[in-house]
Image (cartoon, rainbow, N blue to C red):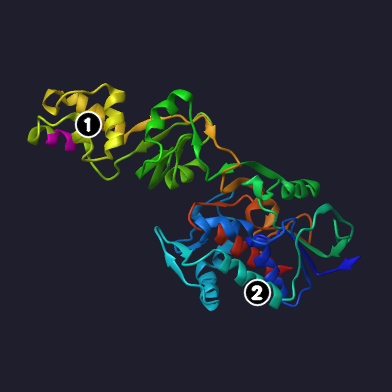
Amino acid sequence: MTGYDVIILGAGAAGMFCAIEAGRRGRRVALIDHAKAPGEKIRISGGGRCNFTNLDIRPECFLSENPRFARSALSRYTQHDFIARVDGAGIAWHEKTLGQLFCNGSAREIIAMLCADLAKAGVDLRLGTQITGVSHDGGFRVETSAGPLQAPHLVVATGGKSIPKMGATGFGYQIAEQFGLPLVETRPALVPLTFTSEQLEQMRPLAGLSLPAQVCCGKAMFEEGLLFTHRGLSGPSILQISSYWREGEEIVIDLAPGQDLGAGLAAAKQARGRQAAHTALAGFVPEKLARQITARLGVAGNLADLPKARLQEMAQAVQGWALRPVGTEGYRTAEVTLGGVDTRALDARTMEARSVPGLHFIGEVVDVTGWLGGYNFQWAWSSGWVAGQAV
C-alpha cells in the first residue's frame, strides 16, 4: 500500500489547486481522477477561453443555505491573488463584461499553468484511475484500480452532477453520506429553462434571437443577455435566474430594460400616427420580436387607430412578460450543481468536516454556488487554497 500525507479525489479546478498548495508546503500528495486529462471543465469553460474569475467577488454573489460560509475562504484567497498567479505565468487576459475575466488565448493555458505547478510541487497525479472505495480506520484508505492508497488527510473535490457526459457523478455526496455528513438537496443551476408546448410555439419563431433583458424571480433580478432557442429560453440572464427559480414559480421578463415603452409608444402615436404598430414597436425591440408580439396580441393597423389601453398592452407584453417555466434542461446542460455537502458540517477556515478529522470537502461538491461569470472558479481556487493550507 502506498502512503501519502494527503489524498485528493478529483483533478478539477479545486482539486488541482489544493494539491499545489499542499505540495508546496512539503506534503506528499496524491491527486486522483478517473478522467484521462486534468481540468476538463476548465478546458470547455468560457467558450474555450476560461472565465477564470471575476473582479467583483462578494459573498452576496453565492447561493448557500449558509451564505456567510464562503466569506472566510473568499477573503483569505481573493480574485486578486489568482489574477497575480495568472500574470506570473504570463497568461494574457481581458475583462469582458460585468467584471468577467477571460484568457485572451485558450483555457488550456490555465490548465498548463496548474499542471506545471503540480509538477513543481511534487504532486503524484494519477489520471485514468477509478476509485472503488473509501474507508477510515485511524487514517483514510482509498481503493483504486491501481491499488490501495492511504493518508491521514482526504480531500473530496469530485464536483457535482453537472455535465455528466464529462464524467460528473454524485460520488462526492456518497462519501459525505458514508461519513454521516448532511446534504442540502442538489439541483441543476445556471441552466436553461423549459416551457409548455403552448409557450414554446410562441417562442420558436424567435429561435436564435438574442437581446438584453431584465429577468426577475421573487427578489432576484439579473439584467444580461437573453437568448430564444428551439427549446425555450437561455442566455446569461436566464441561466442566472435559474439558480433562484423553483418549480411552480413565475418569472417576469423585461425585453426593453431601461426604457419607458408605454410613453415611447404614446409619443410615436402623436408624431407618426400612420405608422404600423409593429413598425413602431420595432423602434424599441428587434423587428422579429415586434412582429411576433403584435401578432400574438392581435394588434393590427396604424398607431392612430389604437386606443391608449392597446398601447399599454403592447408595452406590458414587452416589459412585463410573465410566464411560468415547467422545468430546466437538467444536469445535461447545467454549468454547476446547486446544493451539496451542508456547510454546517464543515469548518469554514479549513473545509474540514467537524465530525471527521482529516476529511475535507472543496469546490462544487459543497453547498456554495456562485453566479455565472467566474464566481464558481473563484470558489474552487479559494476553497482549494484554504484546504491546501490545512492538510
* Closer to us: 126 or 361: 126
Mark identifier at residue 116: 2
Does 77 appear above or below 235? below
> How much space separates mark 1 and mark 2, taking CA atoms?
58 Å
Residue 391 x %, y %:
74, 68
Q: Is residue 265 magenta?
A: yes
Residue 267 x %, y %:
12, 36
Q: Is residue 142 visible?
A: no
Q: Which residues are magenta?
A: 262-268
Quadrant holding the N terminus: bottom right
Q: Amino acid at mark 1?
A: His
Residue plotted at (53% across, 67% down): 78
Does 324 appear above or below 122? above
Neighbour class for label 2 at 10 Å: few (<14), some, many (≥20)? Answer: few
Residue 242 x %, y %:
50, 41
Task: Please report contact status of discs 1 and 2: CB closer than 8 Å, yes or no.
Answer: no
Residue plotted at (10% across, 29% down): 274
Q: Amino acid at mark 2?
A: Ala
Is 3 displayed left or right of 344 in the figure?
right
Is 355 displayed left or right of 261 in the figure?
right
Does 131 appear above or below 272? below
**Callout 2 secondary element:** helix
Count of picture labels: 2
Does 291 appear above or below 132? above
Residue plotted at (28% across, 23% down): 297
Majority secondary structure of the magenta segment?
helix
Q: Which residue is mark 1?
A: 278
Residue 125 x %, y %:
75, 67
Q: Residue furthest right?
A: 1
